Amino acid sequence: MSPISLLGELGRAILNMLAAFGRVALFALDAVSHIFRPPFYPREFGIALLNIGWLSLPVVGLTAIFTGGALALQIYAGGARFNAEAVVPQIVAIGMVRELGPVLVGLMIAARVTSSIAAEIATMKVTEQIDALVTLSTHPMKYLTAPRVLAALITVPALVAVGDIIGIAGGYTVATQNLGFNPAAYLKNTVDFLEARDIVSSLVKGAAFGVIAAIMGCYYGMSSGRGAQGVGRATKGSVEAAAVLILAANFVLTGVFFSL
Amino acid sequence: MIRMENVHKAFDDNHVLQGMNLDIPQGTSMVIIGGSGTGKSVALKCILGLIKPDSGMIYVDGKDAQKGDRDAFLARFGMLFQGAALFDSLPVWQNVAFRLLRGSLKRPADEAREIAIEKLRRVGLKANVADRLPAELSGGMQKRVGLARAIAAEPEIIFFDEPTTGLDPIMSGVINDLIREIVTEMGATAMTITHDMSSVRAIADNVAMLHGGVIQWTGPVGQMDASGDPYVEQFISGSAEGPIEAVR
Ligand SMILES: Nc1ncnc2c1ncn2[C@@H]1O[C@H](COP(=O)(O)OP(=O)(O)OP(=O)(O)O)[C@@H](O)[C@H]1O
Ligand SMILES: [Mg+2]
């Protein structure tokens, strides 16, 4: 392949990528704008709250408790190398609240919610249910996308808060049961160390990740190709995109909150 | 009332519609016939704006269908999809009453349910299917639920994409009568796609044959047998010999 045509290929790939970003951004703006414009579909919103929020609790809780426990063990082992075992409560708290809580919940939501939204909407697309919605005077963005995005915006921060608390509880359990920490002192150290900024950043990250997860599921579902293969591709693409965007957004938000 | 002028639509290099012209007067029943894959479903979707034609004009009531208030436009239509396209997360009666449960036509749930059950009865389904999910019904039953949904809000213009495929002959007869009734009694304008020649004769005021991306022949159903058009004649007789290639 000649250098010129290689350059051409590269240019084309970059242009395609930019075009895809543009499409996603326009879709996201459109989706968000429909949240505020009637008609509203309270029933669909209720179902989305249940599916995205309530039914994600078990997986979020389990992820957080094991991560918190492992974190306590690692910090203890690492800290022991320079006689700093005592920092376990502080570092578990900061690690869970600032980073691991939001990121792990975000990724779990990408796995659980993004995939199911994408598969559901893609199946609706493939079986002409989206077309049927339109002919029944119902806007798919309002009926399908807006309730899910709004529900994710509200429930994922709550899930992150729950994950933070359960993660800290996991660290607490391991530290007090296995590592000989005093329970009361552990809790006091945790509470004293956390700042408002840590908690706010955790919730803001949760909201951002929730919106990313829901929008990527809807976007890939709505732009699904035909047939079972189309549904499979849409689902895979949505989870990949949501996970990568969540991690990228996490980096940006961490920068915004903690390096300025 | 509905007029298609020189409508073109291609998917990549698959040129489906290549200058389709069609006129459907108000309150009449038009039946589209034509081989599988000739673009009959695509033509319906173009009128509804579900697929954007590459070129050409579509008028409804003399107004450009692609411009103007989309909600008001769609509120006049009912559509039965070829694959029924029922919402699989909703029970049958909520599918049928979908329009009556939300939006501008919203009414109390028990009233909507009653209307749904009445419409189900008209397509030959008993009230006990109302609370089942679409996935629990047979293909023919799903088709009839789709039909009930299309007519539930009593739209002025109704499109039926193969309403009787997958139905037994008796049920086909019931559905044919129903479509005829909707046109003659409710004054609706209907456009039906079918492969079933007995349906054509039962439903149609006018017939149009789509082939090669254009309307090959159109005329009143009474003239169909004496059309003199080799395409139509081959289609009616179902013969493999003729201008339409039957690849074997
Ligand atoms: N969304 C789409 N994307 C790509 N190609 C399409 C799409 N919809 C239809 N086609 C193609 O357009 C052509 C006509 O399809 P259409 O569904 O209108 O056929 P039809 O006349 O309704 O056939 P049948 O009687 O079997 O239902 C087919 O070749 C089909 O592959
Ligand atoms: Mg078809």
Image (spheres, grey):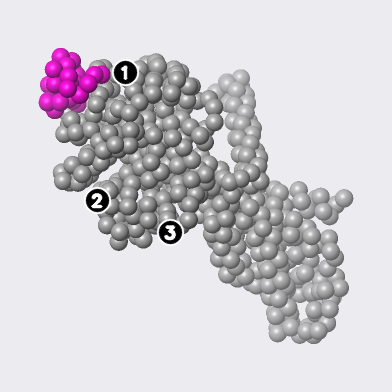
> Quadrant where the N terminus of chain A lies?
top right
Amino acid on which the number 2 mark rests in the picture: Gly
User: Left of A27 or right of it: where is B79?
Assistant: left
**Quadrant in which residue A109 is drawn:** bottom right
Which residue ends up furthest to the front in the rendered image? Answer: B185
Kindly tell me whether mark 2's CB lies below 8 Å from ligand 2. no
Residue A162 at what x, y percent from top left?
A: 68, 68
Residue on which disc 3 sits = B110
Write down the chain letter for disc 2.
B
Q: Residue B23: x and y, percent?
A: 34, 20
Q: Is residue B105 above or below residue B14?
A: below
Residue at image x 34%, y 33%? Answer: B188
Left or right position of B6 against A91: left
Q: Is residue B131 above or below residue A93?
A: above
Query: Mark 1 is on which residue type?
Result: Val
Are the residues tagged 3 and 1 within 8 Å (C-beta)?
A: no
Name the residue at 35% across, 42% down: B151
Residue marked by disc 1: B214
Q: Nearer the viewer, mark 3 or mark 1?
A: 3
Q: Position of residue A14 (x, y in %)?
A: 63, 30
- Which is in the foreground here, disc 3 or disc 2? 3
Estimate the spatial distance between the alpha carbons at disc 1 and disc 2, rounded to whole Å. 36 Å
- Indicate the chain on which mark 1 is placed: B
In this rendering, the answer to whether A229 lies above or below B195 is below
Q: Which residues are magenta?
A: B218-247
Tell me, yes or no, whether dots 1 and 2 are on the same chain: yes
